[in-house]
Image (cartoon, rainbow, N blue to C red):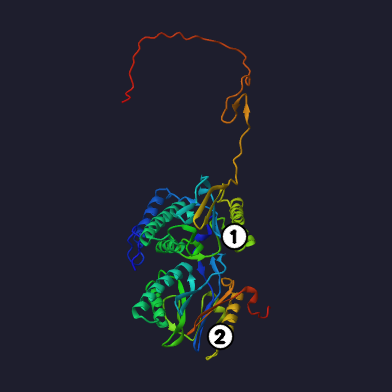
Amino acid sequence: MDPVEFLSKLEKTTIMAVEFDGGVVMGADSRTTTGAYIANRVTDKLTPIHERIFCCRSGSAADTQAIADAVTYQLGFHSIELDEAPLVQTAASLFRDMCYRYREELMAGIIVAGWDPRRGGQVYTVPVGGMMTRQPVSVGGSGSSYIYGYVDSNYRPAMSKEECLKFTAEALTLAMERDGSSGGVVRLAVISEQGVERQVILGNQLPKFSTV
Amino acid sequence: MATVSVCQYHRGGFSFENCKRNALLEADINKLGFSSPAARKTGTTICGVVYKDGVVLGADTRATEGMVVADKNCSKIHYISPNVYCCGAGTAADTEMTTQIISSNLELHSLSTGRLPRVATANRMLKQMLFRYQGYIGAALVLGGVDCTGPHLYSIYPHGSTDKLPYVTMGSGSLAAMAVFEDRYRPNMEEEEAKRLVRDAIAAGIFNDLGSGSNIDLCVITKGKVDYLRPHDVANKKGVREDKIYGRPVTGNYRYKHGTTGVLAKTVTPLNLEVVEENVQTMDTS
């Protein structure tokens, strides 16, 4: 008769980010589970870190929320000191420092993406363990295993913003179909010099693939 | 940069100093054949909903210690600030103390800022404290209130993660209550409809979950007003035993009626006692 909350809440998830010329497209599913119960079916896993820097969170909900809050504070302070917009690489480094230092205690897989004036759109991945690397396209979470093939075969460099949105939405849909820990709605965000545009694709509006 | 709370000074990083000691103590106790006392848990149903003018929080009133009901009418909706209340599920002591600590810190913070506290502030304080204790504080909370930015509702889990949603349920009866919410929730409900919805959700938890029971408490928070309805609904009325016979209540009277046992023979032997010595000692009533 133990209450459900004593199991830790996980965002086992599917998350993804793609660079294009002029910005990045980020996407995530919306499911948070406690054991077999879906604690939140409309989670927002795309968390703003700064005006034009977001992160996709996967792993333990508590750990990633706490890390994101800490990095948001550190980056905001750094940006005020510098009196200019922070670099995406700085944000990613802050994530990496925290995830590596406390690697034994944390379970967090994070994709940092955004736009800065110096290097344009960038995607950095900080998986469990605390490595950091820049990639043009990155997937993460438990559902990512199912879409590596799709991403590798369908990604082309120099895609436009609309192509990236379609690519991300379709990849996430395929992962959500196959992974039990991912589902709900698809949340998308486009970050560019102009700012941030956010979208939600509801369950019945997801792209349809052949049902076998 | 500095926080305004005064209660605890915390160093950076995680401190697991006492875990080893606790494990050794537990092993020692088990060797002697005793078990460490189980924490009293509120196997519970708590929930909250955001409606047109504010939030409605609801809770059952049963506190269990293992399989026994320890308290038939405990209060699970805790005061945080005049405009923010918090329902608590999980270990009863943890929810009680956690909410009191944050309530105290929030009052100091409010005096320092000179403003009515915001729900988001209470949420931050709670999640940061629970994360610091890495889930060892078994407090699962539903935090709701109305501040200058409008009505807000959060669910806070023992490990320190939070969700901001229009309707939330927690506790062992949360699945039953969520079923009711998923069926009947609409955005921008009127107050009566919202109260009925929360009442029905808690009732679902009470009647379908063994860990929840007794009465339904409600707390309706709007801008400038809080209605703490305890109890809002006595869902389980205790029955009254058979009424009176011969003008005396039958309950608690275990004497048999005259004539129940037939008397066959009766012998009376008088005992003549003489008073030999009388000794009076006054009671010391100073």
**Which amino acid is tagged 2?**
Cys
Measured in 3D between alpha carbons, the distance from the residue under mark 2 to the one under mark 1, in whole angstroms, is 37 Å
Residue B169 visible in the snapshot: no
For label 1, the crowd category at 10 Å Cα-Cα, with few meaning under 14, some 14 to 19 and many 20 or more, is many
Residue at disc 1, secondary structure:
helix
Residue B85 visible in the snapshot: yes
Q: Position of residue B251 (x, y in %)?
A: 58, 31
Screen quadrant of the N terminus of chain A: bottom right
Up/down of B211 relative to B154, above or below = above
Where is mark 1, residue-wise?
A: B178
Q: Position of residue B286 (x, y in %)?
A: 31, 26
**Which amino acid is tagged 1?**
Met
- Residue A22: assigned label: none
Up/down of A5 relative to B215, above or below = below
For label 2, the crowd category at 10 Å Cα-Cα, with few meaning under 14, some 14 to 19 and many 20 or more, is many
Q: Quadrant of residue A102?
A: bottom left
Q: Position of residue B204 (x, y in %)?
A: 61, 54
Q: Position of residue B161 (x, y in %)?
A: 47, 65
User: Residue lying furthest bottom in this view?
Assistant: A158
Q: Nearer the viewer, residue B42 or A190?
A: A190
Where is mark 2, residue-wise?
A: A164
Residue at disc 2, secondary structure:
helix
Q: Nearer the viewer, residue B5 or A62?
A: B5
Up/down of B276 relative to A42, above or below = above
Instruction: Assess whether mark 1 and mark 2 are in contact (beta carbons under 8 angstroms).
Output: no
